[in-house]
Amino acid sequence: MELTMIAARVLAPSARNSAPTKRLFFTGSPAIHRTKKLPSCSYSLISQQKGFSILPSPQLTSSSSQQHHRNNSVSMSTMSNETNNNNDSSKPMIHPTVESIRSIRKSIHPSTTIGFVPTMGALHEGHLSLAREARLKNDIVIASIFVNPTQFGEGEDLDKYPRQLEEDVAKLREIGVDHVFAPSDPDVMYGKNHATFVEPMGFDQTKEGISRPGHFRGVATIVTKLFNIVQPTNAYFGQKDAVQCIVIRRIAQDLDMDVNVQIMDTVREEDGLAMSSRNAYLTDEERQKAPILYQSLRTARELFDSRFAKGEEEVDANDLREVVMNVLESEPMISKIEYVAIDDLENMRPMEKVGDGGCVVSLACKLGSVRLIDNIVLR
């Protein structure tokens, strides 16, 4: 399946995006919690309070699946303690299987607005700001937590990517998220006979795509699957992953998905560093130097604004790239600059001249051994 690269406007928010007039709660629905590994490798419902029945999940057979299960396990005892100590402990409901989240989805009335926040976990304020926006604008909020193996390339950090489901669920509970789809194993999303992928054409030729071959096929595939499963009204993503945002808008438009893709501003630390789960890899010294990424992007904004303030109608992309590179090269702890890209806002195609329509300036570099990305929109 080829996805076209024809320019199209982003789906306009519909009337469904207005503040909800009602809130729906599933007070009689069971709260699904994952137990420690059982002999049958199944998962159970908390049954002590309302006599809920047992739901089996697909069998886990591979060693990698078992490791993933251990990394993401939430103990029955811990979640039971939360049930006793939290006034609204039935929320969020945890769904480890597609069947579980679909059963809930089918029970929701068609007029109910659903906000969806897909994540890979290790939640920080950037993720939580998306959840808060979803909570504000929708009747029901669903988040997903799944470290998607198909968007990681060879030699990347799939095995060491932070997995902290218990902590993440607690954060989402504070915001009022209703459901968390947390596939218990990669096999839940990619069965042994899985053979279908969504490949957005042209994005492997972007600077980020060249640096991470196959990454956007993995992103497009998992997002398509999640949209099909959850069927949200609105889906929320952060601008920090600039190309990913364009990819997701493209697949939603090109495949006629009935979902409004909402892109929210990058959330930054006080010193300007874009929030990222991978920031945890930085040493103390590297963390002190990391704000230079955003400082370099701000020089591009200053140049862009000054040129238009002088009455110029366009700015040379090479001039923007040069000022960013100069700042990055001034920091000895940056071990590698992978790219500084000046691309259009519609499909991330390289630009030579930037007019009043604007552009996105994006970069990727290694600070020590940690790969960081950031971007800024100029218009």
Image (cartoon, rainbow, N blue to C red):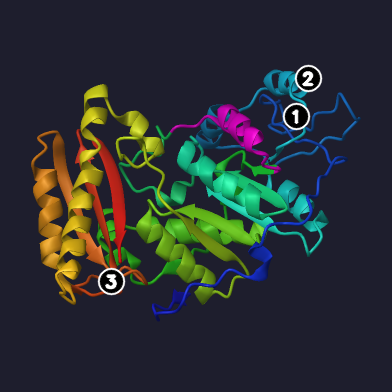
Task: Using the numbered discs, state the Cα–Cα distance from disc 2 to disc 1 in whole angstroms.
Answer: 8 Å
Contact flag, marks 1 and 3 (Cβ < 8 Å):
no
- Give whichever of discs 1 and 3 has the lower sequence position: 1
- Residue kind at label 3, given as amino acid type: Arg
Part of the protein shown in magenta = 162-178
- Relative height, residue 94 to residue 250 (above, below): above
> Which mark is on residue 352?
none
**Residue 109 seen in render:** yes
- Give whichever of discs 2 and 1 has the lower sequence position: 2
- Residue kind at label 1, given as amino acid type: Ser
- Residue kind at label 2, given as amino acid type: Asn
Contact flag, marks 2 and 1 (Cβ < 8 Å):
yes
For label 1, the residue is: 89
Q: Residue drawn 67% across and 24% down? A: 36
Q: Is residue 156 magenta?
A: no
- Give whichever of discs 3 and 2 has the lower sequence position: 2
Q: Residue drawn 47% across and 61% down? A: 220
- Quadrant housing residue 85: top right
Q: Residue drawn 19% across and 56% down? A: 302
Instruction: Give the prevailing secondary structure in the magenta stretch.
Output: helix
How crowded pointer 2 is (Cα within 10 Å; few <14, some 14-19, many 20+) is rated as few
| Foreground of the two, 7 or 224 | 7
For label 2, the residue is: 84
Q: Residue 283 location in percent, x, y?
A: 27, 25
Task: Using the numbered discs, state the Cα–Cα distance from disc 3 to disc 2 in whole angstroms.
Answer: 54 Å
**SS at badge 1:** loop
**SS at badge 2:** helix
How crowded pointer 1 is (Cα within 10 Å; few <14, some 14-19, many 20+) is rated as some
> Which mark is on residue 349?
3
